[in-house]
Image: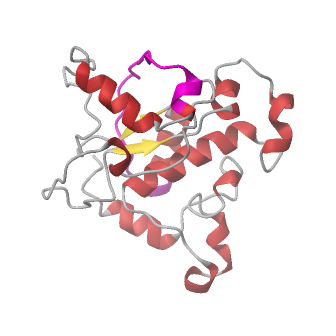
Amino acid sequence: MAVLQEWLLGQVGKTWRTIPAVRIDSVKTAEEHAAGNIYSDIAEQLRTQPARFDESGERTDFCNWRRLYVLYATGYPKLENMSGRQPFGCPPAPENPMEPYGPGVAGGPSGWAMELIAGRISEDDCREQVAPPSQPLGTVRGATLHEMLHCLGVQHPTEEEHGPESWLSPMAGFWFFGLPECRLLPHEVAYLRESHFFS
């Protein structure tokens, strides 16, 4: 997350504040999650267990649209990339200027990506699953950044609308994150500089 924070600051002149991760030990197995919906599973678990608080004293609540929550998981619980508040069953929030798309939550990668970060597998074990093959961690970071920026309202650019350089954006060719060419497009930079969700 620190890598993404620094990169975004260099691109936009603004970045998000972060707080330490909160560990949630699921009451279900990875197989049980994979057969259902891990997003609603974890949200329901938080609702039925004693309140959990982060170090700022705020309760962990995925429906708090003033926070951008990123969910990571080790194992293979079918935590697919997505963004928005709907997967957690959050009620409508008319005061949220980006309702219903976001912000509030972002799904991050799981399976081989999180196993790699956790150190349980080597880069060689997943080299054929990512592109480019020399950038597995860049792929993990890029996919996470991609979903987080979706939660702030940044959409996929297209060559038809934004020209041939659109693929340089992590919102289009996010697997290139970490390479020198990767950068936000001018309209993405302008949008994020005007966002109310940055300090």
Residue 25 belongs to magenta span = yes
**Residue positioned 44% across, 57% down in the render:** 150
Residue lying at the far left in this picture: please name it. 95
At which x and y percent is residue 6?
Answer: 50, 41
Quick one: 56 or 102, which is closer to the camera?
Answer: 102
Quick one: 66 or 108, which is closer to the camera?
Answer: 108
Residue 119 location, quadrant: top right
Q: Is residue 172 above or below residue 198?
A: below
Type of secondary structure dominating the magenta stretch: loop
Residue 166 location, quadrant: bottom right
Residue 101 belongs to magenta span = no
**Residue positioned 43% across, 16% down in the render:** 27
At which x and y percent is residue 81?
Answer: 54, 47
Residue 134 in sight in this render: no
Residue 162 in sight in this render: yes
Quick one: 35 or 184, which is closer to the camera?
Answer: 35
Is residue 125 rendered to the left or right of residue 37? right
**Residue positioned 27% across, 46% down in the render:** 199
Q: Is residue 137 above or below residue 100?
A: above
**Residue positioned 52% across, 41% down in the render:** 4
Residue lying at the far bottom in this picture: please name it. 160
Is residue 50 rendered to the left or right of residue 134? left
**Which region is colored magenta?**
10-33
Is residue 144 rendered to the left or right of residue 41? right
